[in-house]
Amino acid sequence: MASGRRVESNDANALYRLVQKERSALNFPFSISVDGDIQLTQELDREDKDGYILVVFAEDQYGNQLDPPMEIQVIVEDVNDNEPQCELEENVFEIQEDELVGSLVGQLLAHDADEEGTLNAQLMYSIASQSPAPSSSAFSIDPTSGQIRTLKTLSRQEAKVYQLSVTVSDPAYSTECKVIIKVIDVNNKLPLFEKKDGRHGD
Ligand SMILES: [Ca+2]
Ligand SMILES: [Ca+2]
Ligand SMILES: [Ca+2]
């Protein structure tokens, strides 16, 4: 940040003027003192704007330029001030009841508004709870990708629908995302074909 930065003209009587190079609808959060000190006038938020180009003019009392305008680039560094967000209020997945152990059920999608590729936006996934309460856990989640897989062969007699609460965390914050997994019966379609064919399976 440019807080505390000073510019100095060779002319001791120079008056300083500070403008923002690009047009912006946001307030311009910098000012310059008579001594050429650049100050921050309000808190910066990288998620609103991640950089500024300031132009400093040194002028005499008649507004004539004493020096060529000086450009100062300000990069707003990220802080972790956003908690992870679930992309959907409810993630609904379906899986057939005879799928092999380890089958992919779906991928939970979450988002973090902090700077991509940094720890501030690095998300970790873990299953906080499963309903109906398991005799053994039915699902696992990959901590980095959010991919949910089966830990056992599912049976509709055991449960037709599972509800998972998944904790999604960055290094400072966490949020809970809801996942609904419907267990689909594949066998109930077969008798229809058998009747049409007039044949009976074993
Ligand atoms: Ca922010
Ligand atoms: Ca964050
Ligand atoms: Ca941030």
Image (tube, rainbow, N blue to C red):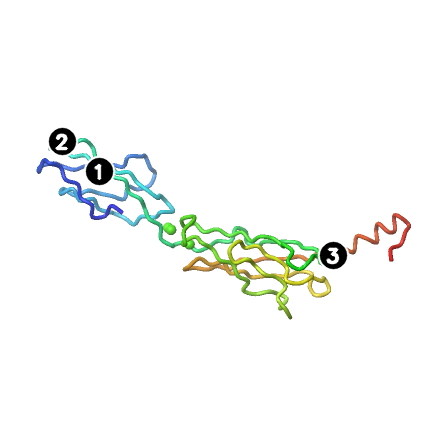
Q: Nearer the viewer, mark 2 or mark 1?
A: 2
Q: Which residue is drawn at 20% across and 32% down?
A: 69
x, y (%) of residue 100? 69, 58
Up-down relation of residue 127 to residue 64 (above or below)? below
Q: In this rendering, would 39 be left or right of 146? A: left
Secondary element under disc 2, as helix, strand or loop, is loop
- Looking at the picture, which amino acid does disc 2 mark? Leu
Q: Mark 2 points at which residue?
A: 66
Q: Earlier in the sequence, mark 2 or mark 1?
A: 1
Q: Residue 18 carries which label?
A: 1
Q: How crowded is mark 2: few (under 14 residues within 10 Å), some or many (20 or more)?
A: some
Looking at the image, the residue that sits furthest to the bottom is: 135
Secondary element under disc 1, as helix, strand or loop, is strand
Q: What is the CA distance from the residue labelled 3 to the residue labelled 2?
A: 81 Å
Q: Which residue is drawn at 42% across and 59% down?
A: 171
- Looking at the picture, which amino acid does disc 3 mark? Asp
Up-down relation of residue 122 to residue 50 (above or below)? below
Q: Name the residue under label 3.
A: 185
Q: Report the label total.
A: 3
x, y (%) of residue 92? 61, 54
Up-down relation of residue 29 to residue 108 (above or below)? above
Mark 3 in CB contact with mark 2 (< 8 angstroms): no
